[in-house]
């Protein structure tokens, strides 16, 4: 039977830790590396609801995208949100492992999955990792044929897990797009790279008012591109889990399950 350490080694051979950003936290957060594993639950977030799902499934390892302890904490008391997760994991014998920005950058990871989902048959890194033409931040590629921005946004909405956030669009809905840049998760720190890439549209999550407004004003000084398609953070980072789970199942001979529980925080949306 595989151990927690065996699963970690399988994941790290594909989503290399050295690809992670310097500020990031990856790897085993809770659990014994020597503990045996027969079922693994894959999810985006290490939330209490995901832990409860693992308990119900009988999983003894959870692999998430987001780390539980990205920022420093001074307590893991069960009365805190993170402490409650730690206590529930330990009391039920469940280990917690995460692959974050290394999974974003790796070939076959978060950004590749998002690029494929939005219709890019082939893509290359928006910002390649040193010495690599297949790994790095974001992806850029071409659609099979031109679509209007409105058509493209509707296709993105159908390709992603449903959330109350939905898909927001900035730009002329009848404008044609063929070249697409994507960054899974919060992506408004990459506008310069997107503009330099010549992308017609940029798909990412968590676009804030001021960066998005400035990006659109700069675009309008030219031909109006890149248009913006803003999606749920959770939805943009869920798509890679199926492939990661299949990879672990094949390599370790364990059962794997991908959570379909939405951990997007928003539960309703009303037009103003």
Image: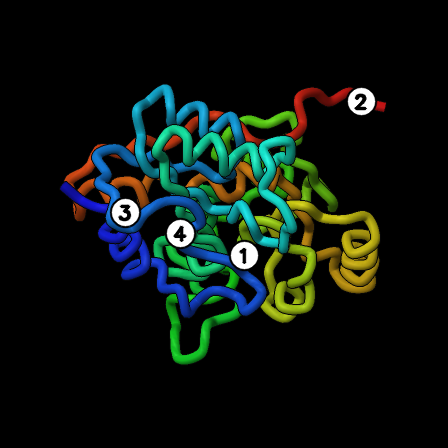
Q: Which residue is mark 3?
A: 4
Is 260 or 1 nearer to us in this picture? 1
Residue 143 coordinates in the image, percent (x, y): 47, 50
Q: Which residue is mark 1?
A: 179
Assess disc 4: are there few (<14), some (14-19) or many (≥20) residues with their C-alpha within 10 Å of its C-alpha. Answer: some
- Which badge, 3 or 1, is on the more N-terminal residue? 3
Secondary element type, mark 1: strand
> Which of the numbered marks, if any, corresponds to residue 271?
2
Residue 236 coordinates in the image, percent (x, y): 53, 42
User: Number of marks in the image?
Assistant: 4
- Tell which tag, 4 or 1, sits nearer the viewer: 4
Q: Which residue is mark 4?
A: 28
Residue 18 coordinates in the image, percent (x, y): 41, 69
- Which badge, 3 or 2, is on the more N-terminal residue? 3
- Tell which tag, 1 or 2, sits nearer the viewer: 2
In this picture, residue 139 sits left or right of residue 173: left
Q: Is residue 236 above or below residue 13?
A: above
- Tell which tag, 4 or 2, sits nearer the viewer: 4
Q: Is residue 152 above or below residue 104?
A: above
Task: Name the residue rendered at 52%, 29% in the picture.
Answer: 48
């Amino acid at each position: 039977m595989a151990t927690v350490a065996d699963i970690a080694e399988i994941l790290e051979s594909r989503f290399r830790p050295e690809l992670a950003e310097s500020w990031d936290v990856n790897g085993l957060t809770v659990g014994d590396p020597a503990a045996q594993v027969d079922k693994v639950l894959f999810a985006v977030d290490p939330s209490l609801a995901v832990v409860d799902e693992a308990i119900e499934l009988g999983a003894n390892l959870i692999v998430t995208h987001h780390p539980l302890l990205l920022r420093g904490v001074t307590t893991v008391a069960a009365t805190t949100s993170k402490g409650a997760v730690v206590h529930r994991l330990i009391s039920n014998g469940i280990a917690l492992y995460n692959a974050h920005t290394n999974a974003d950058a790796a070939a076959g990871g978060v950004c590749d999955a998002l690029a494929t989902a939005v219709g890019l048959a082939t893509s290359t890194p928006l910002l390649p990792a040193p010495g690599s033409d297949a790994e790095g931040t974001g992806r850029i590629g071409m659609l099979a044929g031109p679509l209007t921005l409105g058509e493209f946004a509707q296709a993105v909405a159908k390709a992603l897990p449903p959330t109350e956030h939905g898909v927001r669009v900035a730009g002329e809905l009848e404008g044609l797009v063929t070249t697409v840049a994507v960054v899974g998760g919060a992506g408004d720190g990459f506008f310069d790279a997107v503009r330099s890439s010549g992308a017609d549209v940029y798909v990412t999550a968590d676009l804030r008012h001021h960066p998005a407004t400035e990006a659109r004003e700069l675009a309008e000084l030219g031909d109006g591109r890149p248009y913006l398609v803003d999606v749920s953070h959770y939805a943009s980072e869920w798509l890679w889990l199926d492939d990661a789970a299949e990879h672990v199942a094949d390599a370790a001979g364990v059962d794997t399950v991908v959570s379909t529980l939405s951990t997007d925080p928003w539960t309703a949306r009303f037009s103003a």
